[in-house]
Amino acid sequence: MAVGQSEPVSESRINKLVKQAWNDFKDSNFEKSLITSRVALNYATAAKNNVLIAKSYKVIAGNYNELSEFDKAIFFYNKGLYYANKTNNDSLKYSLNNNIGNIYCFEKKQFDKGINYYKKSIAYSLKTNDISQVYFTNVNIAWAYFDIGRFREGYPYLKFVGNNIEKYGDESTEIIVYMLNGMYANFIDADDAANSYFLKAIAAGKNSDEQSDLSYAHLEYSKFLTKIKNYKEAYKHLVLFNEITEELYNQEKLKKASIAGFNLELDEYKRQIDKIENEKTSQSQSLKKSRIIVILFILISFILLFLIVTLIKNIGFKKKHNLELLQAKEIAEEASVLKTQFISTISHELRTPLYGVVGITNMLLEEHKELSQSQHLSALKFSARYLLSLVNDILQINKIEENKVVLENLTFNISDEISMIKNSLSFLSQKNNNKISVEIDEYIPEYLIGDKLRLAQILMNLVSNALKFTKDGEVEIIVKLDRIEGKFYYLDFLIKDNGVGIAAVDQNKIFEKFVQVGRKDEDYQGTGLGLSIVKRLLGLFGSTITLESDLGAGTSFSFVIPFEHDPLKTQKIIEDIEVDLTSSEIYKILIVEDNLINQLVTKKIIEKNNFICKVVDDGFGALAILEKEGFDLILMDINMPLMNGFETTKRIRLLGIKTPIVALTAFDKDEITDEAISSGMNDIIVKPFEPVKLFKILNYLITEAKNAG
C-alpha cells in the first residue's frame, strides 16, 4: 500500500531510511532494499527534498541494475539525475552519471554513450576536487575498454590507476584493479605476471564483501587458464564463478524483489492520486466540524440514493462503452504499426531497383563520354533521383510524426549550402526556362553552427516547388540578418517567385499532407508532402513559415531560424570531423549480395578505385570463401534468402574473423542500427549512395583495423 504522508517526517529520519535501503542493497537483500527505498522516496517527495529524492531513486535504480532490468535501472537513474541537477550536490551527480555509464558500457553495449556519461562524472569530481572519484571512474573506463577487447585504448586509464593506487585505492576497487592488470598482462602474453595478478585479485576477494567482483576475477582467471591450456584449473574457477553468482541471485530473492519493484512502480502513478485523496480527506474533516452537515445529511442521503440507482443503470453502458474504446485504441495502435511496417517495406522495395538504375546510369555516363550530353540519360538519372526523393519524403514525414527526428549541430557556410542547392536544381530550372538568383547579407558570419541538412531540405523543397510552378520567370533566394542575441544569429530567409501564385482560399490547405492545389492532370509532379515537411521541420527549429501570394503575381515564403556563431566551437567541430583517408594500397573487398544488378553496380564502383573485388550470392557463400581467403573489408547486404546479413555477420564473428563489415542496404538506417551493432557490424550505408561516402568509410575502417591489429 502507499505510505501515508499526513504527518511530516524529519530529514534525518528520511536520510536514515535511505542509508538502510543502501545497506540492504549492498547485502543483496533486494526485496527489503526496494521496500525501504520506496518508503524513503514517498517521505522525501512529501518533504520536497531534491537531494533525498535523488538518493532514493539511486538506490532503486541500483536494485534494478542488479536484477538485470537495465531499462528500468536507466529510467530511475535518470529520474535521480533530474532531481540531483536541481541541487548543488556535485558528488551525487558524479555517482549517478558514473552508474549510468556502467550500464551503457557493460550491459547495453552502447560503449560511446557510456564513455560520455563517465566523462560527465569525472567533470563533477574535478569540480569538487575529489580525485578519489576520478580514480574510481578511471577504473570503470579501463574495465569498459578491456571488456570489448580494446586494451591499448584502455591501458592509459589503467596506468593512471596504477600511479595513484597507493593514494586513492581502497578495498572497493582492489579486486578489480588486480583483475584488470591480469587481463592486460594476458593480452601482452606476460603469462607469469597475469597469473600473479589474477591470484592476488582472488585472494583480495576472499577477504572482501565484494563477492560480485570476486566472481568476475574467477571468470577472467578461467579464461586465462584456458588460453594457456590449463583446462582443469580453468574449469575449477569457472565452477567457483557459477557458485558465487548463483548464491547472489537465487530465484526466491528475485521473485520477492520483483513484487516489491512492481509496487514501487505503482507508486509513481499513485502519487498524484494520493495528493487528490489527501485534499479530499481534508475537506471531509472540515465538513464534519461544521454544523451545516447536520442540515445537509438528509439531502445528501437522498442524492446518494439517486446516484446509486443511476450508477446501477449506467454501469452496463459504461462497461460496453469502455470495451468499445479499448477496441478502438487497439485498432488504432495496430494501424499505426502496420503503417510504419508498410512504409519501411515499400521504401526498401523501391530503393533496391533505384540503386541499380542510378548506378547503371552513372556507369554509362562514365564509360561512354559521348553520351554525357544525352538528354535521355540525363532525364533517366533525374527521374530516378526524383523518385528516390519521394521515398525519402514519405520516410521523413513518418519520422517527424513519431518524434524520431533530432536536430544536429554541424558547422557550415550559408553561401556554400545555397550554391549547392542552386546547382542541384539547375536541371529543374532549365526545364521551365527559369532563373535562380541568390542574395546573402554580407553581415552574416562565414561559419555558423546548426542542422545544415534540415535547412537544406527546407530550402530544396521551397525552391523546387517555386521552380515547378513558375515558367519563363525568376526564383529569388534572399537571406538577411534579422537580429543577434548572444552567440545566436537569427537569419531571415525569403523564397520568392513570379509564378502562378496561390488563391487565398487555398493558402491554409497547402501545408497539409498530400494536398496539391490548382493542379491539373497534365501539370506538376509531386506527392504533396514537400510543404508539410517544411512546416514540421521548421517546428523543430522553433520557427514558423509565412506565406504571401496572389494568383498570377507569384508567391513568397519567409521564415526565421537562429544559428550559433562561435569560432572556437566551430574549430573544434572541424577538428572532430573524420577526414577522408586516402591510400595507395590496393585493398581486397568481399561483396555479399543476392541481387545480380546490384552486384554489377557495386563491383564496378569498387573496381573503379583500383581495388580487388570478389562477389558471393549469399551468407553461406561468404562463410565458405572466408575460410579460404582473407579480405580487408566486407560489404554485406541485409535482405538475403536462406540467411540474412545479421545472421551471416554473427557467424563470421563466431569464427574469430575481425574484418570490418559494412551493411550495404536499402533499409532505413534508424530501423536496423541496433541490430546491426549487436550482430557485429561496423557501419551502415544506405543504397543508393554517393561513391565518395563509400570510399571514405571504407578507407577509415580498413586503416583503423590495421592500426588495431
Image: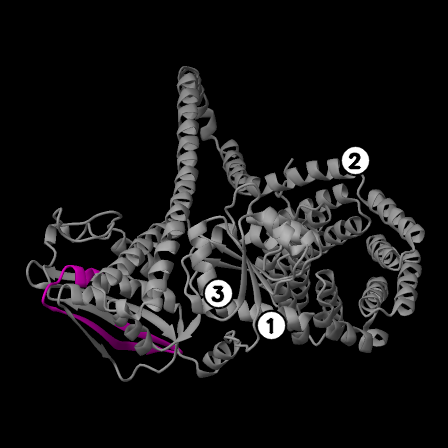
Real-space CA distance between mark 3 and mark 1, rounded to the nearest whole angstrom: 17 Å
Asked whether 279 or 268 is in front, the reply is: 268
Query: Residue shown at 42%/45% (left/top)?
Result: 344
Q: Is residue 345 above or below residue 47?
A: above
Q: Is residue 187 above or below residue 47?
A: below
Magenta part of the protein: which range? 465-492
Query: Residue shown at 28%/57% (left/top)?
Result: 386
Q: Decide: marks 2, 1 in contact (CB < 8 A)? A: no
Asked whether 692 or 252 is in front, the reply is: 692
Is 360 placed left or right of 198 in the picture? left
Q: Which residue is mark 3?
A: 606
Residue 703 numbered mark, or none: 1
Amino acid at dot 2: Glu
Asked whether 88 or 474 is in front, the reply is: 474
Residue 96 numbered mark, or none: none
Residue 99: % across, % down:
68, 59
Q: Secondary structure at mark 2?
A: helix
Query: Does the magenta run of residues contain 25?
Result: no
Q: Which residue is mark 2?
A: 252
Q: Decide: marks 3, 1 in contact (CB < 8 A)? A: no
Query: Residue shown at 46%/49% (left/top)?
Result: 595
Residue 95: % across, % down:
69, 63
* Sequence order check, earlier mark of 3 and 1: 3
Residue 309: % across, % down:
42, 15
Residue 569 makes an appearance in the image = yes
